[in-house]
Image: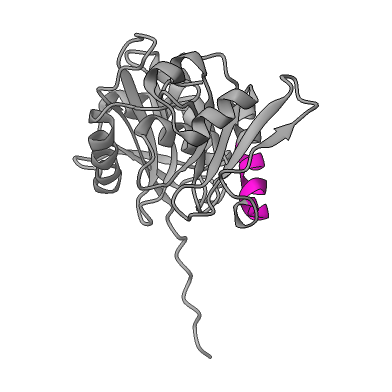
Amino acid sequence: MAIKKPTRKKLNVWQAAVRPSGATFEDGCKPQDLVLWVERESNRVRHMSLVEADSALEPILKRTFAAAQNSPMPGCQAGCPTEIQVDDERLLATLEKIVQNLPIQVTLQRRLDSLDQFFQMMLQSLEMGPGFAYLDGTQIQPAEIKSLALETIEFLEAQPFDEIDGDDILRVDGLHVSPVYLSVLGMADIEYGLGIYLTRETAVAYGEGIDEESAARLPALSLTLVTEEDCPPGLDVEIRKNRWPCHPMGFPLLMRVDGERV
């Protein structure tokens, strides 16, 4: 009779770190630290968030560890590690306290290759500045941007730019601000989105070509798409952190046409 060998329990090793990002955002707040939770074998990022530098370590690790387990980033399944690797003795002591009643081992490593590989990539992006972000220094709620993303997906799936020329001006009534005038971008396959204007005069002016002086007098909004490759670091962090839905064509970027954030 063949003897069945006992199967070895598959290890699920995560790496965790808090690194100074060097990023300082528009509202003048203190520099930000980047908190990362990464799967060692797959190199997938389970959770990342920017926190104010020098914040209390235990509440940050509790919150981000819970997020990494229960609501990880796309591509990862909810679950729990068998081992957490860190390269900082403060993290070691804090995590040992947090998981003391769980079957999880916390170990101190000289290097965290999987995590550091991703961190260096993020650091290069953050050194260029966070760029556009929806939530930083504003009163906008994540749910509002999620709604915008979902509506944009519906817009792109409907493909109105196949039927409506960018020179056509559409009037929309019944909104909180009414009427609103729209031009649909995309028939030329150059840029997809919407031009949004509060008066017909403004819509016509932009359609005919507008100078800087007139643009200051006739403000308008532009809804365009940003691809994953061109996404500003600040917005990229927000999308990942809040798990906002993205269409393959891009994520909505809503700005004033003069480049100011809405």
Q: Is residue 154 above or below residue 22?
A: below
Residue 187 rendering spot, x and y as whole percentages: 54, 54
Q: Is residue 99 something one can see in this rendering?
A: no
Question: Looking at the rendering, which quadrant does residue 58 occupy?
Answer: top left
Question: Looking at the rendering, which quadrant does residue 110 occupy?
Answer: top left
Residue at x 72%, y 33% (from the top left corner): 171
Question: Looking at the rendering, which quadrant does residue 166 occupy?
Answer: top right
Residue at x 28%, y 30% (from the top left corner): 126
Q: Compare residues 122 and 206 and report the one nearer the observer.
A: 206
Query: Is residue 157 located in the magenta-colored stretch of the structure?
Result: yes
Residue at x 64%, y 26% (from the top left corner): 200
The answer to whether residue 143 is left or right of residue 242 is right
The residue lying furthest to the left in this view is 110
The residue lying furthest to the bottom in this view is 1
Q: Is residue 107 above or below residue 186?
A: above
Q: Compare residues 179 and 107 and report the one nearer the observer.
A: 179
Residue at x 49%, y 83% (from the top left corner): 3
Q: Compare residues 108 and 14 and report the one nearer the observer.
A: 14
The answer to whether residue 31 is left or right of residue 262 is left
Residue 199 rendering spot, x and y as whole percentages: 64, 22
Query: Is residue 224 located in the magenta-colored stretch of the structure?
Result: no
Residue 48 rendering spot, x and y as whole percentages: 42, 34
Q: Which residues are magenta?
A: 149-160
Q: Is residue 92 something one can see in this rendering?
A: yes
